[in-house]
């Protein structure tokens, strides 16, 4: 959006969110949720460092924002009922 | 196998949010996979809400919010030099007060090196000035942004790039007792919190927010690359830090110390150490030495709590 | 109202007249009396500002950077080691475009210890993106603090400014100072309303990481705006003259230079002595003049280049930076590059040693001798005990 120094704001200030960063490309392993095992405790949502577990409304099952999920695997490691597995991304 | 926070959370009703729903952090930030810092940041901001202004020094905390012109948090953030978090918070607070914006919470957020080492003077000054703010130290136990150099908050025996054989070369005393130092400095409220205990973290942050004057939170924030561990183990390891007594959770409030998370059936420190390759070089003797240090530390804390209640 | 004031008192009164909102103070000789007077004014209720006692100068500047983002007009003062300790955050302040105004009681930097006046502390901070105003007397200190806010806060500038006060020579000596009426100051200096400013309802990040793809552009903006500040300084000086009836000639004050053959470039309180000496030598019919370097940053390259027609230029450095001559000398020499006049560096007045009329007269006579006989030596330390010190 900026072309030259002339377009710059007088003071360096941010203008957009990091949502534009596709950190999902960092991922080696992808979390996959088995909804039959999920008991909707939302542990995965609470601990996700990348705000990449989506729960729209109370009662909903969680889903994963694969654009941003870095594949750390915390959600799978800490899932009480073991509903999340980490699967190798294709090369 | 010891599960992470899941056990705790499952005790609650399914399908309900047990911590605040509002997100004040965007995805797409620059933290490494499995980093504890954004977990701590996200939970803290959920606790404090959007009328919060934050300032951060050098460190991972200056990198994680993203590269200009992008930004990951939904609160105003001011970056500054390494050693002046407390001072910058004092200035922000003063100007907000001068402008009549007294309801805004000011948070200085810094790492352990930026707090217990280079930033200690400025934090002490902010307490002395009585600045109404919350200072949060996310503790990953070394200078992680520069690649794991020993800080004053590195635990005894840990490998870092500047203590390649464990820290017998120097740093002989282990983690500086920053919370107690700040209590003696005159802080209004202080607590240790842990990302693996999110409800407690949120509760302590909200208590701190409700108290006027300088407040301090010490958050344990595991660093998978620096601690040389699997990034999926961040919460599990953090939880073990408290369950083994390596990182006890306690607060200082109304002139009294108290444990905020009682440790029942304390686990041996080895369970915590063996998940992290930064402790891999330790001999059985050294591990029992660490166990002794932890035992003594908890006895000392007990005595401190007892004494503060008298 | 005419009052008998030290320059430090004049600086503190100027801060009050500027209606500063946040002050951060830390003591250091010979600045301390500014902080003390601010404290008194705040405690008496004469100054409605948040007054912060800091635990170091580094913290004082850091606090003001934070306060300035929120939109407060900010003030601190320092000297010597305090300024050196601030070095890192001075660069931060200019890099993030905070228009902080700071009087500096110019002093030595140890070791060994010496608390007296010279320009070493401010000269070593010439490259940090701050404007630098060098004052000749106490009146100019008061007036320059007001002008500095005017220029610094101009949306086209947004850079911090140091107001240099010669340690002890001005900071601790009393002179007659005309203190302007508050309503006139308010007319001259509107309230500080920066845009953008920290806004809780429109959360942004200020000062975060910039990659190599844009860093150069941000630095270029600072360079351009520092250059543009020259015009703003001239305008601010002229407008000051209209409202208060006195001004200072912009960036360089030329004193009897029009028909001069030799001109001494000099900054600070010693310029007053130099003007005095010029008057005496003019009585003898000698064509000498003084170009007082009032502003060293932005550097007055055009004004200095105008001196190209003079046969001999002397540059007096009240500091020494251990290079090929002093810092002021080198910048003047480079602004005159290509002209065929002779430029010589004089160094003196260090560590509280007076720059006397006799020293200055010797300098002028030496320059006149060079006019006839050519350059004797490039760098000359003046007033050394063995009377030489030259190479």
Image (spheres, rainbow, N blue to C red):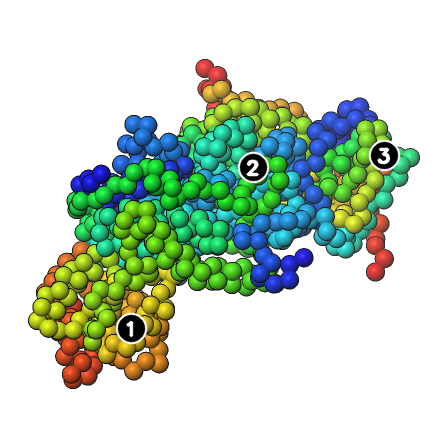
Q: Local crowd at mark 2 within 10 Å, few (<14), some, or many (≥20)?
A: many
Q: Secondary structure at mark 1?
A: helix
Front-lying residue, B258 or C262: C262
Identify the residue position indicated by label 1 in the image.
C307
Q: Residue at x 33, y 60 (%)?
A: C251
- Extreme residue in the front direction: C242
- Extreme residue in the left direction: C284
Q: Residue at x 17, y 46 (%)?
A: C175
Snapshot quadrant of residue B54: top right
The span from disc 2 to disc 3 (Cα, nearest Å) is 33 Å
The span from disc 2 to disc 1 (Cα, nearest Å) is 52 Å
Q: Local crowd at mark 3 within 10 Å, few (<14), some, or many (≥20)?
A: some
Q: Residue at x 32, y 46 (%)?
A: C243
Residue C299 locus on image (x, y percent):
37, 64
Identify the residue position indicated by label 3 in the image.
A61
Residue B208 locus on image (x, y percent):
55, 27
- Extreme residue in the bottom direction: C373
Q: Local crowd at mark 1 within 10 Å, few (<14), some, or many (≥20)?
A: many
Labels 2 and 3 touching (C-beta < 8 A): no
Labels 1 and 3 touching (C-beta < 8 A): no
Q: Residue at x 76, y 36 (%)?
A: A45
Judged left or right of residue C261, residue B214 is right
The span from disc 1 to disc 3 (Cα, nearest Å) is 79 Å
Residue A90 locus on image (x, y percent):
85, 57
Q: Secondary structure at mark 3?
A: loop
Determine whether C206 is above or below C211 in the image. above
Tell me if residue C27 can be seen: no
Q: Which mark is residue B53?
A: 2
């Amino acid at each position: 959006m900026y072309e030259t120094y002339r377009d710059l704001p007088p003071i360096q200030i941010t203008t957009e969110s990091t949502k534009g960063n596709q950190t999902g490309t960092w991922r080696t392993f992808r979390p996959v949720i088995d909804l039959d095992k999920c008991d909707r405790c939302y542990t995965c949502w609470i601990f996700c460092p990348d705000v990449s577990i989506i729960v729209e409304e109370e009662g909903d099952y969680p889903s994963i924002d694969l654009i941003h999920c870095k594949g750390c695997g915390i959600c799978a490691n800490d899932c009480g009922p073991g509903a999340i597995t980490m699967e190798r991304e294709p090369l | 196998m010891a599960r992470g926070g899941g056990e705790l959370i499952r005790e609650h009703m399914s399908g309900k949010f047990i911590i605040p729903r509002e997100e004040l952090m965007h995805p797409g930030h620059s933290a490494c996979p499995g980093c504890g810092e954004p977990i701590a940041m996200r939970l803290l901001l959920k606790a404090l809400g959007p009328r919060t202004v934050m300032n951060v020094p050098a460190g991972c905390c200056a990198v994680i919010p993203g590269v200009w012109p992008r930004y990951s948090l939904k609160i105003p953030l001011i970056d500054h030099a390494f050693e002046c978090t407390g001072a910058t918070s004092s200035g922000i607070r003063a100007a907000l007060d001068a402008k009549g914006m007294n309801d805004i919470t000011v948070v200085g957020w810094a790492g352990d090196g930026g707090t217990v080492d280079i930033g200690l003077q400025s934090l002490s000054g902010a307490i002395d000035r009585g600045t109404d703010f919350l200072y949060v130290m996310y503790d990953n136990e070394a200078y992680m942004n520069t690649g794991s150099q020993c800080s004053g908050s590195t635990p005894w025996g840990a490998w870092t790039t500047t203590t390649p054989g464990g820290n017998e070369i120097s740093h002989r005393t282990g983690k500086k007792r920053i919370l107690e130092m700040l209590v003696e400095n005159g802080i209004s409220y202080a607590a240790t919190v842990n990302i693996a205990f999110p409800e407690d973290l949120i509760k302590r942050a909200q208590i701190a927010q409700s108290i006027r004057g300088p407040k301090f939170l010490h958050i344990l924030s595991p660093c998978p690359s620096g601690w040389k561990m699997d990034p999926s183990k961040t919460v599990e390891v953090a939880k073990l830090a408290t369950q083994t007594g390596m990182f006890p959770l306690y607060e200082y409030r109304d002139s009294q110390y108290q444990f905020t998370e009682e440790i029942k059936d304390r686990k041996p420190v080895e369970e915590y150490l063996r998940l992290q390759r930064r402790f891999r070089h330790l001999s059985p003797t050294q591990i029992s030495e660490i166990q002794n240090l932890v035992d003594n530390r908890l006895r000392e804390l007990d005595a401190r709590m007892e004494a503060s209640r008298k | 109202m005419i009052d008998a004031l030290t320059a430090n008192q004049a600086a503190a009164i100027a801060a009050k007249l500027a209606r500063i909102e946040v002050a951060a103070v830390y003591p250091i000789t010979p600045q301390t009396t500014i902080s003390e007077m601010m404290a008194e004014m705040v405690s008496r209720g004469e100054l409605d500002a948040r007054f912060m006692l800091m635990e170091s100068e580094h913290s004082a500047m850091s606090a003001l950077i934070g306060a300035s983002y929120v939109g407060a007009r900010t003030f601190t003062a320092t000297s010597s080691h305090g300024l050196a300790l601030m070095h890192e955050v001075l660069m931060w302040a200019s890099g993030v475009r905070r228009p902080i105004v700071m009087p500096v009681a110019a002093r030595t930097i140890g070791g060994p210890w010496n608390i007296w006046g010279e320009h070493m502390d401010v000269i070593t901070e010439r490259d940090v993106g701050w404007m630098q105003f060098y004052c000749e007397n106490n009146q100019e200190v008061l007036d320059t603090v007001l002008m500095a806010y005017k220029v610094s806060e101009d949306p086209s500038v947004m850079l911090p400014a140091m107001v240099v006060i010669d340690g002890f020579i001005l900071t601790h000596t009393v002179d007659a100072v005309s203190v302007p009426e508050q309503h006139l100051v308010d007319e001259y200096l509107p309230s500080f309303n920066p845009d953008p400013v920290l806004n809780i309802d429109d959360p942004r990040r200020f000062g975060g990481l910039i990659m190599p793809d844009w860093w150069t552009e941000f630095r270029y903006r600072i360079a351009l705006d520092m250059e543009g500040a020259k015009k703003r300084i001239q305008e601010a000086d002229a407008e000051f003259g209209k409202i208060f009836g006195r001004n200072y000639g912009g960036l360089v004050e030329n004193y009897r230079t029009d028909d001069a053959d030799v001109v001494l470039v000099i900054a600070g309180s010693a310029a007053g002595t130099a003007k005095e000496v010029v008057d005496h030598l003019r009585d003898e019919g000698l064509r000498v003049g003084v170009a007082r370097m009032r502003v060293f940053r932005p550097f007055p390259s055009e004004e200095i280049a105008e001196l190209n027609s003079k046969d001999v230029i002397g540059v007096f450095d009240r500091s020494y930076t251990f290079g090929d001559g002093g810092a002021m000398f080198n910048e003047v020499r480079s602004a005159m590059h290509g002209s065929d006049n002779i430029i010589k560096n004089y160094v003196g007045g260090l560590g509280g040693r007076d720059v006397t009329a006799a020293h200055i007269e010797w300098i002028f006579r030496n320059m006149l001798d060079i006019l006839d006989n050519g350059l004797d030596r490039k760098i000359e330390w003046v007033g050394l005990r063995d009377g030489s010190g030259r190479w």
